[in-house]
Amino acid sequence: MGVSTPEWVKDAVFYQIFPDRFAQSARVPKAGHLQRWGDPPHPHKYQGGDLLGVVEHLDHLVDLGVSAIYFCPVFQSASNHRYHTHDYYRVDPMLGGNEALRVLVDEAHARGLKVVLDGVFNHSSRGFFQFNDILENGEHSAYLDWFHVHGFPLHPYAGPEIPSGYEAWWGNRALPKFNTRTQAVREFLWGVAEHWIRFGIDGWRLDVPNEIDDDEFWQEFRRRVKNINPEAYIVGEIWENASRWLAGDQFDAVMNYLFTRPVLGFFGARTLNEGVISGTGYGQVPALGAEAFARQVTEILTLYPHEITLAQLNLLGSHDTPRFRTAAGGDESAFRLATLFQMTYPGAPCIYYGDEVGMQGGRDPDCRRAFPWHDPSSWNVDTLEYTRKLARVRRNRRVLSRGSFEVLHARGDLLAYARSLEGERAVVLINAGLEAASFAVAGLEPGRYREVLSGAPLELRAGEALPVAARTGLLLLRE
Amino acid sequence: MGVSTPEWVKDAVFYQIFPDRFAQSARVPKAGHLQRWGDPPHPHKYQGGDLLGVVEHLDHLVDLGVSAIYFCPVFQSASNHRYHTHDYYRVDPMLGGNEALRVLVDEAHARGLKVVLDGVFNHSSRGFFQFNDILENGEHSAYLDWFHVHGFPLHPYAGPEIPSGYEAWWGNRALPKFNTRTQAVREFLWGVAEHWIRFGIDGWRLDVPNEIDDDEFWQEFRRRVKNINPEAYIVGEIWENASRWLAGDQFDAVMNYLFTRPVLGFFGARTLNEGVISGTGYGQVPALGAEAFARQVTEILTLYPHEITLAQLNLLGSHDTPRFRTAAGGDESAFRLATLFQMTYPGAPCIYYGDEVGMQGGRDPDCRRAFPWHDPSSWNVDTLEYTRKLARVRRNRRVLSRGSFEVLHARGDLLAYARSLEGERAVVLINAGLEAASFAVAGLEPGRYREVLSGAPLELRAGEALPVAARTGLLLLRE
């Protein structure tokens, strides 16, 4: 079977939104007991973002150069992150309900933006209907075979000293694990996936799909989704090598944390905040020099079929990690260099909401602060402009999305690489060091270039060395 | 303000269906762990009735003379009776979901049948979304003001020795009581009522509406429902005098248990099964003679405005009571005489599903047995034919629904009464005794009559006495 992934993903720039924290619309009625917008995130409190708020800021995304949005869960859930699904067929009322998603998808599509939703199919919440039926009816429940019950009575809300009586995600009794061996459960979950693809979404990000240890489940999932929309994107949350799922018959791609770690290790090498990194999904992030970094990011490109590599979701951080900038000790230049690399590397870049204006944030839930629409003075407008330039050039120049990747130079703090496609050529020069440096790279073919970040034209002569200021990079596109 | 109630109700014959137990369709997928159809009802088990099953038996109802169906709750609920509402906007998946209700309402309407649903607005279930949010997020919940929380932590599933921490219906922690003082809750509940009226249902039966001690709530409820469909029926479950709600600004009618009790006391006088009656909503049901019975059923007609009296839901039993026949000690004649009275008395008769084929059943949950489609040999076909004749004549002769009610004779076991309307006249003669008796009633005007149950013509001459066999009655319609 040939491996095929959606064409649109390969040229896409994603933007990840945590729905409770991106934007609020006055048109969506809110519950009475919310945190104030912008307060330090609380594990159990809502700040009241909604989907019409997203609609009202779509122009920000278009202006930024984004072409697809990946949403953390939007379905009805009694948690501010909404991973505790209460109802898979209903968008959370505080987000504006199904009507708001209708408006969002339509308005996004009208602007050429794709919409990918987060599918949490491994587990439900304690309030999910069929699990609630077990809580209410005990051993007499009609839905006993929907979950893994070890014995009655269950203790859904007891403290850790009392076993829950059922299987749950990582033992967290708030998240009872589906019994995906039961045909009705399989049909239910596949049906959910089909329903929202028919509704018009453009793909599924799959939460902890490796916990459903069942290739056939995901193969059928893929068949059903692609049968409705062959260009739907299926991207799994797998933090390690994902070869099992990336042979072409399950996912199109994964969240590329294998990319994130070396990027953080190289660009943040001098400033890594180990306190904020340790204990997250990253595990240990060693500081890297250019040699090791180049080796790792080259190797990543060989892990999976090429079609899949081009569709990988390359992220600098997510709702599950400290923000890149914070993990890099607050160093703005680390974030910018990482963005330059991300936007010029194979695979679809994904901007975590607010990174583009310089938001900070430590480990969950601190990485989920409210977007500072209320405080524009806090925005880093230089970073915003920097990100915008790179996102736009990424969208416009296929050499950056589809071209080959070749490291030209990698030593100490200096990295140079080229992208090539059908006569097009881009060269990236990065000086991650604290002092200015010059590149005299063999692979820098002479000719007329434009440097994207400054907009300046550049006539490159044979043997010439190119100066790059400390902690900056150049993106050269051959004219 | 003039009191106005729906015209169609005054001429209606209702049929009450307990959805899990009326009929199953092979077209609705079922959960894995069901009781067998027809097994003794278990408090926590489902037998798997569904709404397409009802559709498949609508012809039975039409044939019976029924013109309206009142359904016990159909919304998603983790209980076989579905009073523990999990989702007010979704028909239970085991009933076939919203799609099945769509088919049901359309098919019913196509046959001239109205559909009334049960609205459980005083309380929700523990799995209901906003209550679940409180369970999940505790004092940080966005929906704290949706319920009456006394203090944290809550103990939703603890035993009776530990207080729940919140207000619930009659202290039953499975049924947390809404805080209907909160505007968002009011809007939510009114919105549910409006939604399903817009969907096409013909009215709401309101579960324990007296527990929402708030006239303005129900006044607004009425305004909103009637604004969408002025002929929608609003009938409350009030077991005692309901004057407060029946002044024209709240309900159209109530479930007329004030009617049920004397009917049981008179027709079942000799055989009352006090063991099965005691401890039910009926309280004490004293045996009555014809004099007391006539006084009581005459007085009932004066309790409320006439428009309301004509729209009352006159029932012989429900899902909350033993079946009439069982309460009357199994005496078939008691049920038949009660049906004769019910069908010839002002107010809309309501047949509890299966009573027409002679089903028995004691207190809840025994009164909720599965309809014996699987065992036609168990049907009492005489009672079915008897009920059918009376239901049909009730529908066809306005004198029976709209006419005045006048007791002609009431002594010992003998009761006679007349209904009159614009020259039409019906006379009912009932001999509740164990021996044949003769009626020589002054009010029996001479003339040509037809006796409905036998179909026989009858020439009544002045001063003539009419014999009535033991435990039977005659329904005379003047030709």
Image (tube, coloured by chain):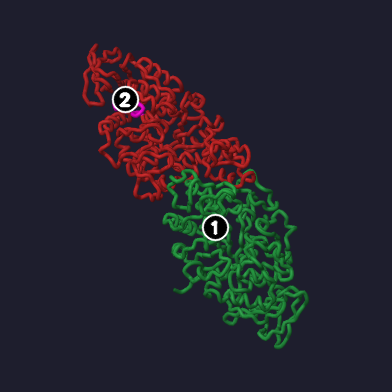
Chain colours: A red, B green
Residue under label 2, please give it.
A334
Question: Is-magenta flag for residue B225?
Answer: no
Task: Give the label on residue A415, or none.
Answer: none
- Look at the magenta stretch and give its main secondary structure: helix
* Front in this rendered view, residue A56 or B242: B242
* Front in this rendered view, residue A49 or B451: A49
Vertical relation: B217 (above or below) A25: below
Q: Position of residue B228 (x, y in %)?
A: 45, 62
- SS at badge 1: helix
User: Is residue B98 visible from the viewing direction of this image?
Assistant: no
Vertical relation: A406 (above or below) B187: above
Residue at 73% over, 69% down? B333
* Front in this rendered view, residue B195 or B161: B161
Which image quarter holds the C terminus of chain A? top left
Q: Amino acid at mark 1?
A: Val
Give the chain letter at badge 1: B
Residues packed near mark 1 inside 10 Å, few (<14), some (14 to 19) or many (20 plus) = many
Residue at 62% over, 60% down? B320
Question: Is-magenta flag for residue A329?
Answer: yes
* Front in this rendered view, residue B246 or B436: B246
Left or right of residue A71, residue A388 in this image: left
- SS at badge 2: helix
Task: Give the label on residue B105, or none.
Answer: 1
Left or right of residue B387, residue B310 in this image: left
Q: Position of residue B469 (x, y in %)?
A: 76, 76
* Residue at the extreme front: B161
Q: Which residues are magenta?
A: A324-334
Which image quarter: residue A387?
Answer: top left
Which image quarter: residue A52?
Answer: top left
